[in-house]
Image (tube, rainbow, N blue to C red):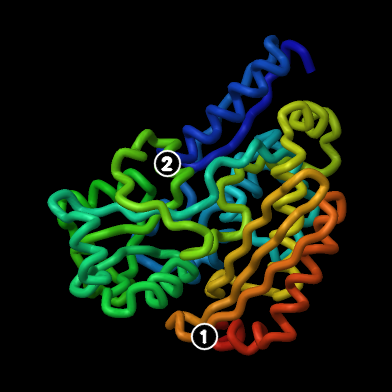
Amino acid sequence: MSGQVLRIGTRKSAMALAQTEEVARLLRISAPDLAVDVVKFETRGDQDQTSKLLRHGGKGGAFVAEIREAMRAGTLQAAMHSLKDVPGNEETPGLVLAAMLARDAANDSLVLRPGLSLQTFRATRGKGFKIGTNAVRRAAYLRRLFPQATVIHYRGAADTRIAKLDRGDKQRLPDGGEVGPADALVMARSGLARIGMTARIAHDFSVDEMLPAVGQGIVAVECVETDWATRARLASIANVESRISAEAEREVLWVLNGHCNSPIGGHATLAGGEMTLRASVLDETGDSFIEATRTGAANRPRELGRAVGLELLDKGAAELIARTRPDE
């Protein structure tokens, strides 16, 4: 493919563009004569900053669908995704996640409005604070960790959310109402790092406090399954540890048949030839909480993910997920 062009699709947000530029940088190192053309998309989730993502079919419909359609149509050779935005409980016929980059920090972080202190937040245990998030998993954990705080629906790209927080903007709701302004946000540390805003982090949540989303911190590159030339190119930038961690975590989603409104967390860690996988299922209030942790061979990640998923089902995960499933 020397001297050829690889067209890669991505969202227009600052974070997505930063992630895609990292993919392009690695590809250029691997093949100096390769021209990487970044094609920007404004997805349905980017256009609609009011509705909950469920309206667009969850994160897959909101942030992934249009870019995948362009790949299937042949106008793109590849697409960059944050892996946590790629549904893990459904097949993607004709497409394959051909490369995953080395994982960035997987944890979530707390960002405070200027003038508010972490000391005050901790002293009050969040009482009187309005904490913004659009993620049902984060919302459930926040209600569990800070039951006296108010968790509000909050949308936007990472930099947009912080700007809204700093200005004291209210968040429009799908029914025409408003909530806020927010006093704090919970966001992925990796996303804040990508846009150069780690200085805004007031607190990093440990995985004991808030288990990350499945695949959080992993940049994935997708292409058409039968495009062997592109698959070979992407294989040159793939990270094996990210791949096997993702396989274990996403197998949990597959077993649970979790949907976009399910508060599910999952995180795999590697130590030598072993992998430890921890996963959780909550209800939306955070009151009901199920967790499972197992260690197994790192070279059998799906087997480990299946075992953790089945343990969660044995503990009652299906009932919790059913509670959050939208009415048909």
Q: Secondary structure at mark 2?
A: loop
Residue type at mark 2 is Ser
Residue positioned 29% across, 71% down in the render: 173
In this rendering, the answer to whether 135 lies above or below 216 is below
Q: Quadrant of residue 90?
A: bottom right
Q: In which quadrant is the C terminus drawn? A: bottom right
Q: Nearer the viewer, residue 199 or 227?
A: 199
Residue at 30%, 52% in the rendered image: 111
x then y, percent, for residue 56:
51, 65
- Front position among marks 2 and 1: 1
Judged left or right of residue 219, residue 16 is left
When asked about the image quadrant of residue 307, the answer is: bottom right
Q: Nearer the viewer, residue 209 or 302?
A: 209
Q: Is residue 73 visible in this depiction of the protein?
A: no
Which residue: 58% across, 70% down? 264
Side of 305 relative to 181 (left or right)? right
Residue at numbered disc 1: 288
- Cα–Cα span, label 2 and label 1: 35 Å
From this view, report whether residue 7 is shown above or below residue 217. Answer: above
The residue closer to the viewer here, 186 or 87, is: 186
Left of 26 or right of it: where is 166? left
Where residue 3 appears, as percent x and y from the top left, is 73, 11
Find numbered disc 1 in the image and state the secondary structure of the residue it sits on.
loop
Quadrant of res 34: top right
Tag 2: Cα neighbours inside 10 Å, few (<14), some, or many (≥20)? some
Of the 4 image quadrants, the one containing the N terminus is top right
Q: Which residue is mark 2?
A: 13
Residue 196 percent coordinates (x, y): 37, 34
